[in-house]
Image: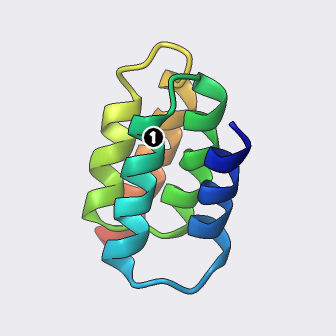
Amino acid sequence: VRALRGYIRIARQFTLPEKERSKMCNLAFDASNRADEQRMVQPVLERYPNAENLELAAKAMKTPELRDEATKVHRAIADKINK
């Protein structure tokens, strides 16, 4: 759990190429079996909006514990990339 949270923190805080950050978010989301860690990925997706992160937010919307937050993130990303 600590390693996964640290990995998510790296994706959020470090300067990374867009594709690499999206890949890290996807890996972290898929590696986590707890909604708490999956929830930590959501602000990273919103902070760095792109098509891949929009897809991951849509995927998160299928998890009942994440549905509300992921829906908000999905809308925010869609608004940002459609401008």
Closer to us: 79 or 68: 68
- Residue 57: where, in percent of width, then height? 39, 43
- Residue 47: where, in percent of width, then height? 56, 66
Residue closest to the far front: 3
Residue closest to the far right: 2
Going by the image, does 47 lie left or right of 54?
Answer: right
Going by the image, does 71 lie left or right of 41?
Answer: left
Where, quadrant-wise, is the C terminus in this rendering? bottom left
Q: Amino acid at mark 1?
A: Phe
- Residue 70: where, in percent of width, then height? 49, 36
Q: Is residue 79 visible?
A: no
Going by the image, does 50 lie left or right of 39?
Answer: left
Residue 61 figure quarter: top left
For disc 1, the neighbor class at 10 Å (few under 14, some 14 to 19, many from 20) is many
Residue at 32%, 37% (x, y): give it. Answer: 58
Identify the residue position indicated by label 1 in the image: 29
Establish if 41 lies above or below 48. Answer: above
Residue at 47%, 13% (x, y): give it. Answer: 64
Going by the image, does 19 lie left or right of 17?
Answer: left
Residue at 73%, 43% (x, y): give it. Answer: 2
Closer to us: 37 or 79: 37
Closer to us: 5 or 72: 5
